[in-house]
């Protein structure tokens, strides 16, 4: 879309006496020829013809938006700027807080976590394999596990994304999470204020529910 | 130079020793020189299953301590000339083993045989650790039940961290045998499917052995079930042995019952 923005000079008037109006315009034509003429009230054919003959641009009975005074504008602008600055600072500090926790010692593990193994991570963990029954994982940061969890999980981060079997033991910020909430292909468990919110990230494929019937 | 295979399970009673006896004999019957070694110090039973109970003169501890030579202690199988057996000590316990002695023994066996199969004790204590320490490969025997799977998972974890080959930067090859499969129970969902087990353990499957009542009788008589041509477990061990010797043999689906196979066939003609 192409657009332009510009200011126009407007001459606004009402017409009581047509002859006086024409006489006034004749004398001041040089002054008004670049103005937009706004006529309030009745506009006769006679005047229309006159304005057209002088090739003046005119409109009839219209309410034009009026700009505020320069002072008021400046004041409003400075308030807006101050609010915007505050928002930006808040967002920045929040983001910093988040990224401090997000990128704190991110560990990536791509091996099956077998029974009896204990993994303790001070920071975030991205695990790309299974956690078998009898294995334990503890993270102080966020946790993402892309494959099935059958072991124990302790996560104290802002969020974790996992899929757990019914055998798994999942504890998020000291609260045990029932695995029936974690049955989708991937579930996000996060702390929002004082509440723990669980949402599916990826739904389980329908075929998973199909039982072979006789 | 041969290959050393440790047969492990984690949980006891899943059929480790039976597997060792049958695979040892199976490999020997494929024309390879094979030694089977009982590492279950203090609880010897491989000799009974191989039917060599009354031949044992010297045991593994005496060989390691230098009281007897390896040649003197190795017992020749009655069934196949290629198979030799080294018995565990029945009177001593696991504490007599140490890494140096085990390494020396394993090396000597490796130099003299194509295949050296070590029967590990159950559990994950020192006896188990010594068995896997110098192994090139491991066969993990499991039953299709959760406790066996979890213990095997733990044993694999220890194998992956404590074996000498891993410490040297290598990897121990791991093969899975699923033992005592009852097709009916797998079909009805009471027993774990082999696909699920493979998902959990994530190692290569080398064979599935169906439950077979003949195994107990064969063990009691000291004639490994692989010698019984009509035994389904024996046939399974035969296939696994051939696979271990590098032959390509298709996996037989022992989880399908005859009746369900019939149902499938009937379904085609509907």
Image: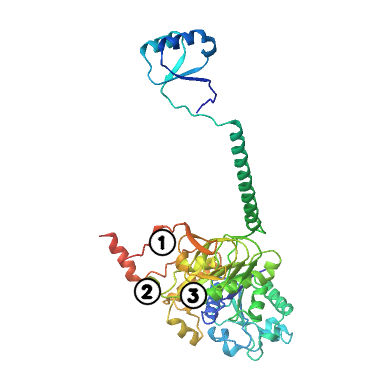
Q: B116 or B133: which is nearer to us? A: B133
Q: Is residue B169 above or below residue B122?
A: above
Q: Residue at x 42, y 25 (%)?
A: A62
Say which element carries label 2. helix
Q: Position of residue A214 (x, y in %)?
A: 30, 67
Q: Which label sits in the foreground, 1 or 3?
A: 1
Q: Position of residue A210 (x, y in %)?
A: 36, 62
Q: Is residue A10 above or below residue B180?
A: above
In this figure, which residue is indicated by the disc labeled 1? A208
How far apart in space, not on screen, are marks 2 and 3 (Cα)?
A: 18 Å
The chain identifier of the residue carrying mark 2 reads B
Sequence-wise, the earlier of marks 2 and 3 is 3
Q: Position of residue B53 (x, y in %)?
A: 57, 88
Number of labelled discs?
3
In this figure, which residue is indicated by the disc labeled 3? B146
Mark 1–mark 2 contact, CB under 8 Å?
no
Say which element carries label 3. helix
The chain identifier of the residue carrying mark 1 reads A
Q: Which label sits in the foreground, 1 or 2?
A: 1
Q: Is residue A165 above or below residue B217?
A: above
Q: A144 or A135: which is nearer to us? A: A144
In this figure, which residue is indicated by the disc labeled 2? B184
């Amino acid at each position: 879309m192409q657009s332009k923005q510009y200011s126009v000079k407007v001459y606004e008037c009402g017409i009581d006496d047509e002859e006086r109006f024409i006489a006034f315009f004749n004398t001041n034509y040089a002054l008004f020829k670049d103005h937009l003429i706004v006529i309030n009230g009745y506009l006769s054919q006679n005047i229309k013809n006159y304005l057209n003959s002088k090739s003046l641009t005119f409109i009839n009975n219209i309410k034009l938006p009026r700009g505020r005074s320069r002072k008021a504008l400046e004041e409003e602008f400075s308030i807006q700027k101050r609010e915007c600055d505050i928002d930006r600072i808040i967002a920045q500090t929040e983001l910093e807080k988040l990224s401090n926790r997000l990128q704190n010692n991110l560990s990536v593990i791509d091996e099956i976590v077998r029974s009896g193994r204990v993994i303790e991570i001070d920071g975030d963990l991205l695990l790309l394999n299974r956690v078998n029954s009898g294995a334990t994982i503890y993270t102080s940061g966020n946790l993402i596990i892309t494959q099935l969890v059958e072991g124990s999980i302790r996560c104290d981060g802002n969020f974790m994304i996992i899929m757990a079997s019914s055998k798994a033991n999942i504890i998020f910020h000291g609260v045990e999470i029932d695995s029936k909430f974690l049955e989708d292909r991937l579930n996000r468990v996060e702390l929002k204020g004082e509440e723990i919110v669980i949402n599916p990230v990826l739904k389980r494929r329908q075929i998973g529910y199909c039982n072979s019937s006789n | 130079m041969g290959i050393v295979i440790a047969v492990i399970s984690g949980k006891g009673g899943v059929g480790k020793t039976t597997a060792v006896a049958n695979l040892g004999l199976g490999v020997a019957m494929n024309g390879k020189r094979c030694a089977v070694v009982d590492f279950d110090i203090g609880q010897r039973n491989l000799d009974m299953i191989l039917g060599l109970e009354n031949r044992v003169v010297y045991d593994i501890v005496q060989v390691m301590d230098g009281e007897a030579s390896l040649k003197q202690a190795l017992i020749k199988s009655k069934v196949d000339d290629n198979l030799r057996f080294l018995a565990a000590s029945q009177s001593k316990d696991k504490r007599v083993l140490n890494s140096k002695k085990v390494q020396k023994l394993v090396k000597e066996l490796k130099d003299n045989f194509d295949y050296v199969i070590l029967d590990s004790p159950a559990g994950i204590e020192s006896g188990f650790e010594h068995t896997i320490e110098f192994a090139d490969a491991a066969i993990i025997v499991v039953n299709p039940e959760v406790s066996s799977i979890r213990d095997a998972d733990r044993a694999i974890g220890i194998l992956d961290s404590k074996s000498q080959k891993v410490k040297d930067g290598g990897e121990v090859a791991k093969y899975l045998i699923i033992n005592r499969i009852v097709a009916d129970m797998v079909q009805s969902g009471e027993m774990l499917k082999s696909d699920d087990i493979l998902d959990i353990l994530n190692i290569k499957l080398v064979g599935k052995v169906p439950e077979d009542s003949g195994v107990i009788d064969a063990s009691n008589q000291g004639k490994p079930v692989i010698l019984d041509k009509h035994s389904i477990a024996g046939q399974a061990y035969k296939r696994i042995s051939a696979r271990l010797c590098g032959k390509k043999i298709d996996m037989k689906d022992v989880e399908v019952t005859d009746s369900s196979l019939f149902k499938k066939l009937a379904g085609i003609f509907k």
